[in-house]
Image (cartoon, grey):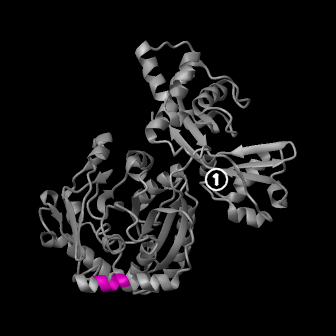
Amino acid sequence: MRFLIIFSTIFFLAADALWPTGIGHAAVREPAWAGRFYPASREDLAHLVDTLIRQAEQEAEASGQGSHLRALIMPHAGYAYSGITAAHAARAIVRDSFDRVLLLGPDHRVGFDHASITAASQWRTPLGTVPIGDIGPVVDKRPEWFDRVAASDRSEHCLEVVLPFLQTRLLRFELIPLVLGPCDTAGMARVLADLVDDSRTLVVVSADLSHYLPYDAAVKRDKETLERIIALDPNWLDDQENRTCGRYPVGVLLALARSRHWRPVLLHYNNSGDTAGDKDAVVGYGAVAFYGGEPMQSSSDASQALSPEQGEVLVVLSRRTLADHFGKTFSSDEARQLDALLADPALQTRCGTFVTLKIDNQLRGCIGSLAATAKMVDGVRENALNAAFHDPRFPPLKKKELDAVQIEVSVLTEPVALEYTDADDLLAKLKPGVDGVIIRKGYASATFLPQVWEQLPRPESFLSHLCMKAGLPSDQWRKGDLTVLVYGVQYFEEER
């Protein structure tokens, strides 16, 4: 196996002229790896993909996630090696349930920062052509992050190899293909946010796991990597030595998942030693699905989730409230414009809200209300002032600190009781990265917003710290005598 991999790399470097040319200016991105990573004929390819998906359906337990698929991680090696793992990812897609796929993969062959986009308007595989969607509005946000790298478009395999599985599950969809080099993963996630917030868009990350370790070492390393993915590791880019070729695309996905409270589920793992290679030097493959509910509702059943633009209005309101406190004046036009935006009926619904202040990524104040007693805009005004001046953990905010403050506004759903029998059942029912949690025992009570999972991704640690916050012993949750409520959150961060 090692000889074949080395040979194919040398062949690529020595025979660039054999790759399809002019892709950077062509209407159609033609297949570059058909006949090598997967069959070149339509009939053989369709038969193989169908066979792999049927095999995956026979092997897998019923997923039963009960919520909407939002993203997948799937491998991109030759189908003889990783095809069954890719099939486990593909089978999670309900047929024809998406109109658009945002496909992210890592640069293997050129070397560039940020993102490479294609100039083609269609992408062809032996199964047919897929239209390429307009990415102009995304590029306009950070044009310096996007370039047309023709050499990558011409030769990169990570997107092409995944595409036939998507074509098999989705009859008609548009593709937005991005190849990523080193980048600001959180920033890239924010740039792609408008695409992702459409529930008819599926995010797919193409990534293999460890490369060329002995079998047992690879299994151990890959298990650690997959555990970090499942935990939505906020420090994902740390300690990436031989974990995955897709560190940056996966990092973008984890940032998206944390901010939108998607829940990852491991669907399948194996490596090339389990399929078509020897066990001396293997490549790992994982399939992970990310699930999230349909767009979140506020405590008013008739009120749909806020748009990013509506959330931005709440953040602006928080900053304006603090600026007003320090005596800053605004023109009558500015005041009328904000008042018009705040009159939006969606912002007048009653729900719980929190306002969080940070300086240099360190907490500077956080106050909120869990109950849906105040209108959203009134709650945000009050909690902005309380977070700045009445959080007992911090001195009152000073005027000179205002420009350094980053503001985050959280909008809460109505808390609901979580029924559980014992500590193990409680751990099983909590949704890390998704649930805001309230605990109560007698007069003791405390809550953590879902954002706290980023610092405390293990449920045991999350609950222990929450008990201490309530003034209870750290292991009180193990005794099964706490009242536990959970709630959902939409939160909006200020971009500085």
Residue 358 visible somewhere in the drawing = no
Residue 174 in the image: state x and y as whole percent.
Answer: 29, 61
Q: Nearer the viewer, residue 154 or 196?
A: 196
At 28% from the left and 57% from the top, the residue drawn is 111
At x 42% / y 45%, what residue is drawn? 190
Amino acid at dot 1: Asp
Residue 10 position in % (x across, y down) = 23, 74
From this view, report whether residue 430 is shown above or below residue 168.
above
Magenta span has 365?
A: no
Q: Is the N terminus in the top left, top right, bottom left or bottom right quadrant?
A: bottom left
Determine whether, in the image, residue 262 is placed left or right of residue 437: left
Q: Nearer the viewer, residue 345 or 406?
A: 345
Near-viewer residue (419 or 204)? 419
Q: Which residue is mark 1?
A: 435
Element type where label 1 sits in the image: loop
Segment colored magenta: 46-50
* In this view, 466 is above or below 17: above
Q: Position of residue 310 (x, y in %)?
A: 47, 36
